[in-house]
Amino acid sequence: MPGNLLTASPFPTVLPDIDSVAYQTARRILEDHPVTASMAPMDLSALAQHLANVITDLAAGAA
C-alpha cells in the first residue's frame, strides 16, 4: 500500500509563499473558520497556498 490514507495529509506538501497577500488572506480565513481552525499548521499552510494558487490562476485567466 503506498501510504496510510487515514493519517496522510489530504493536501500536497507545498512551501507557502508567506509574502503573498493571497496566501496571507487565505490563511487568515482558514484560521478563523470553525471547520479548518483545528487543522495541523502544516496542513493549514498547504491548503492556504493551494487556495491562493487557485485564486491567482483564476484571476489571471479572467484578465
Image (spheres, rainbow, N blue to C red):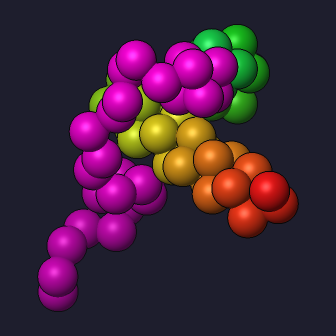
Determine whether 23 is above or below 63 in the image.
above
With 46 as the anchor, is 15 left or right in this view? left
Quarter of the image holding residue 15?
Answer: top left
Residue at the extreme right of the image, as rendered: 62
Magenta span contains residue 18 = yes
Residue at x 42% of width, y 54% of height: 11
With 13 as the anchor, is 51 left or right in this view? right
Q: Position of residue 54 (x, y in %)?
A: 62, 54
Magenta span contains residue 11 = yes
Give the number of callouts: 0
Boundaries of the magenta span? 1-26
Q: Position of residue 35 (x, y in %)?
A: 70, 30
**Would residue 12 be visible to someone looking at this image?**
yes
Residue at the extreme front of the image, as rendered: 63
Residue at x 82% of width, y 60% of height: 62
With 6 as the anchor, is 13 left or right in this view? left
Quarter of the image holding residue 36?
Answer: top right
Q: Position of residue 10 (x, y in %)?
A: 43, 58
Characterize the magenta stretch by its predominant secondary structure.
loop
Determine whether 41 is above or below 48 in the image.
above
Front residue of this view, candidates 21 and 12: 21
Residue at the extreme left of the image, as rendered: 2
Front residue of this view, candidates 6 and 30: 30
Determine whether 28 is above or below 14 in the image.
above
Determine whether 5 is above or below 54 in the image.
below
Quarter of the image holding residue 43?
Answer: top left
Residue at x 73% of width, y 64% of height: 61
**Would residue 40 be visible to someone looking at this image?**
no
Residue at x 80% of width, y 56% of height: 63
| Quadrant in which the N terminus appears | bottom left
